[in-house]
Amino acid sequence: MPTIDPDIADHIAWCADLRGLTPATIRVRRWVLNRLAISADRPLRDCQVGHLLVWEQTFVAGLAPESRRCYVQHVISFYAWLQKTGRISHDPTEMLTRPKLPKPLPRPITETDLKRAINAASPKLTAMLCLMAYCGLRAMECANLLWTDIEVADGQTWIRIRGKGNKERMVPAGEVVQRALRRHGTRMRGPVFIGRDGRQMRPNSVSQVVNEHLHRLGIRSSAHKLRARYATQAAKHCDLSLVAQLLGWTSLNTARHYIKPDSERSLKLVAALDALAATPVPRTDPAPTGARPTERTAAS
C-alpha cells in the first residue's frame, strides 16, 4: 500500500534509516498508519482523540489481543515521533486501549526431539538447528549471518550476531555448532545461508524451512522453541545479566521468565507438604454444656 500522508513517509524513512527497524516491521507500520489515515480522512497530524477511537472501534476491536496491541503500539510510536519532531503539541492516543497480554510459560523443544531433528537434517539445516538451539539465534539472525561473523579468539569460537534494531552481541559457540558449520561448508565471506535462488536467505524462509522439517518429523515445535531451549539452559548455568546479554534482551525480566524452580528443592517442598497432610490432628473433645470452669480458668 503506497503512503498517502507526507508525515507517514517521513516517519517511515526515519524508521528505516535511523531507527533501524526491520523491513517486516516497517511494512506493517506503514499499513497500519495508512489505514488510520483512510479512516480519519485527514492528515494524521490533524487527528483528535475521537478520530483514533473510531479507528480503534472499526479496525482494531475484535482482533486477537496480540494484533490489537501491535496496531495500537504502531500508532502510539508514530504520534510520539510527531511530538518529538515538533509537528504536534498534543497526544491523541491517550484514550487508546493497550491490552495486557498473558505471558505463557516457555515450552522449549525437548532434548529427544532436538536430537531427532538434527539427525534427520541436511548439513545446511543442521547448522540452522544448532545455531538456534545451541547459540540462541533467531531466524532473522540466522538469515543475516555472514561467514566473517564467525571469529576465533583465545581458542574460543565466537559468533557476532546482529539482532533486532541492529544491536550486536557476541555469543560463544561450542563444538556442536562448530562441527555443524564445518559440515555445512566454510567460506571466507558472504552469507552463511543461501537460498535456492542463489541469494541470501530471508528470515521467513529460514523459519519456514525449520518449521516444516520439525512438523515433517511429527515434532510439535517451532524455530522459536529452539531458541527457548537455549534460553532455558542458559538460565540454569548463568546469572540473569549474562542470560539477557547472550539472548540480546534489554530487560532482566525476560530472562527471569526462563528460570524454572529447582527440581530437588521443589520435591522437598512437596514431600514436606504431604507429610503435614498425613500428620494426625490431636483430638479435642468439646466441653459439655453447662460444665463448671476449671480451677485454673476460674483463677484467671
Image (cartoon, rainbow, N blue to C red):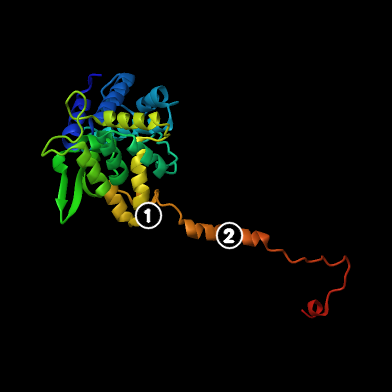
Q: Earlier in the sequence, mark 2 or mark 1?
A: 1
Question: Is residue 170 positioned above or below 286 on the image?
Answer: above
Quarter of the image for the N terminus: give it: top left
Residue furthest to the left: 188
Quarter of the image for the C terminus: give it: bottom right
Q: Quadrant of residue 167?
A: top left
Distance from the alpha carbon under mark 2 to that under mark 1: 23 Å
Query: Is residue 280 something that shows in the picture?
Result: yes
Q: Is residue 4 found left or right of 95 in the rendered image?
A: left
- Crowding at label 1, few (<14), some or many (≥20) Cα neighbours within 10 Å? some
x 35%, y 40%: residue: 226
User: Which residue is more in the foreground, 140 or 46?
Assistant: 140
Question: Is residue 248 positioned above or below 215 on the image?
Answer: below
Name the residue tied to disc 1: 236
Where does residue 91 sit, x and y in percent of width and height?
A: 31, 35
Where does residue 54 sit, x and y in percent of width and height?
A: 39, 24
Q: Quadrant of residue 58?
A: top left
Three-letter residue code for mark 1: Lys
Disc 1 is placed on an element classified as helix
Name the residue tied to disc 2: 271
Three-letter residue code for mark 2: Ala
x 28%, y 37%: residue: 126
- Crowding at label 2, few (<14), some or many (≥20) Cα neighbours within 10 Å? few
User: Which residue is more in the foreground, 66 or 12?
Assistant: 66
